[in-house]
Image: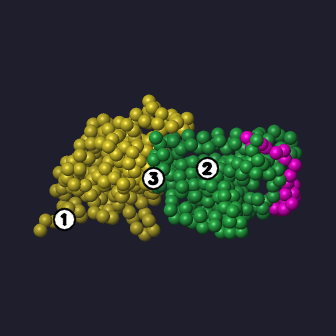
Amino acid sequence: MSLLSLKGVTCRFGGITALNNLTLDLPAGAITGVIGPNGAGKTTLFNCITGAYRPSEGEISLRGESLLGLPPHRIARRGIARTFQNIRLFPSMTVWEHLMVVQRGGGLRAALAPLSLSGDTPRRRAEQALERFGLAPFRDRLATTLPYGVMRRVELARALTAEPALLLLDEPVAGMNHEEAAGVASLLQGLVAEGLTLLLIEHDMGFVEHLCDRVHVLDFGTLIASGTPAEVRRIPAVIDAYLGVEA
Amino acid sequence: MISSYAAGLLAEIGIASIAALSVHLILAVGQLSLGNAAFMACGAYTASVLSVEHAVPIPLAIAAGAVVSGVLGLIVGFPALRLRGIYLAMATLGFGEMTRSFFLSLDATGGAAGYSGMQRVSLIGIWAWALPLLVLVLIAERSRLWLALNAVRDDETAARLLGLNTVALKLGAFTAAAALAGIAGGLFAHWHIFIEPGAFSLDRSTEMVLAVVLGGSTVALGPFFGAAALALAPEALRFIADWRLAAFGALLIVILLLRPQGIIDKRLLRALKP
């Protein structure tokens, strides 16, 4: 069953077509990758799904319900969370505060309860995230002062505290070494095993092949190939557009 | 019994603290308002007319003034959503001056001659508002809701994409801030038992912002402390007579150079904790 589906999504900015008649389905509980050269429209795709941009044409729906025209915070509340290509953490907040800030539920009374109140659900959720992402040692540190790899983990943990059904990851291992990337990969696999669906943009082909069930290849806003990582690797158009011809 | 001089200072500190908290609340979403005196004026005039002409008990009249100011804040908040930084500061400054001229031309409340006839509120009456409000903001600061306000300040786009209703948060902050300023206005009117539009000029708005900047804008104790410092410093400097305002200005500059984050911040509070 598909969780998210896009039908004929086109996104134009002035004379530029950033996404051209894109149709794809995301199966629930799978890891789907989007690859393509710079400027292929990958981040535009994320921005259309999350409501940051409104597509010029086409339809985007989550579990059969249209997302078009909804403001970004409503789309997020339907169950779509994301991380950003350039890490976007809140400079004034500690790691712990990042894990509390986007949580919902419990109404205004819960929102106004002191953070230190024990036994309350958001707090438990944040504690779990702290454990799971190995952030406990950094709990009370300002998040933006931490090493790069840790900041990426904070971003991921923050997105998950909103309890999404679909998580969009924009280059989750950019700038990480192999060991850190492998750590993120196993974290992500664990999340998918628990029922999360992932859509990720990544340039690291090794990471994509290792992790993704399906890959979509974008070039100049057009979907040029879809399939398993092994399949798309052999398609000539993909090699031309992205992987490059081995000399 | 405390002297009327001390009582006057304490009353001023109480009123200025509430006013400073209103600026603090708007700063929590990263917005700067230079027009909060307008909300204060609105609360002052509403409460005064109610208590003088309709014999409404003072606390009720002040609460009504807060509601009217809050509604005004909500209305002003809508256009303010589209502005930020210096542009919002200019827009709120314009709104402040507009409100002052409105009361200047409004004959029903005496225009430039001012309005009087209020019963005087006691010093305890003032602090019966100021202290609970301070505690309320201090509690709110420890909540997820306050974190959400700060998220809007830190990175509005990210906050929105992560599911925070940034529009509601900004409007809510503006409305609550206006209501707080309205309470400060109602108390001001019933302490001085005379109000005139000139009391709610840009000077007043600037003073509120200054209290927050001086005291520190990261925790509510900052604005509170800043308001007290602003009221007390010129008094403490009386011994240098004519030079005291100049010395006061110099002192402000020195403090802000030494502590650009304001006198009180989270780190200081942590350090003071036993």
Q: Quadrant of the N terminus of chain B?
A: top right
Give the mark nearest the N terminus, 3 or 1.
3
Disc sitting over residue A244 in the figure: 1
Q: CA distance from mark 3 to mark 2?
A: 21 Å
Badge 1 marks a residue whose secondary structure is loop
Badge 2 marks a residue whose secondary structure is helix
Q: Are marks 1 and 2 on the same chain?
A: no
Residue located beneath label 3 in the image: A92
At label 3, which amino acid type do we have? Ser
Disc sitting over residue B224 in the figure: 2
Q: Nearer the viewer, residue B40 or B190?
A: B190
Q: Are marks 3 and 2 on the same chain?
A: no
Horizontally, is B255 left or right of A25 in the view?
A: right
Q: Residue farthest to the left?
A: A247
Q: Residue farthest to the top?
A: A119
Q: Residue at x 27, y 39 (%)?
A: A190
Horizontally, is B76 left or right of B192 in the view?
A: left
At label 1, which amino acid type do we have? Gly
At label 2, which amino acid type do we have? Phe
Q: Which chain can be seen in green?
A: B
Disc sitting over residue B52 in the figure: none
Q: Dot 2, how many residues are within 10 Å of its Cα: few (below 14), some (14-19), or many (20+)?
A: many
Magenta span of residues: B102-124
Q: Residue at x 22, y 54 (%)?
A: A177
Residue A49 within the magenta-colored segment of the rendering: no
Q: CA distance from mark 1 to mark 2?
A: 63 Å
Residue A69 placement (x, y as % from top left): 50, 51
Residue A125 placement (x, y as % from top left): 39, 36
Badge 1: chain ID? A
Q: Which chain can be seen in yellow?
A: A
Which one is in front in this view, the residue at disc 1 or the one at disc 2?
2
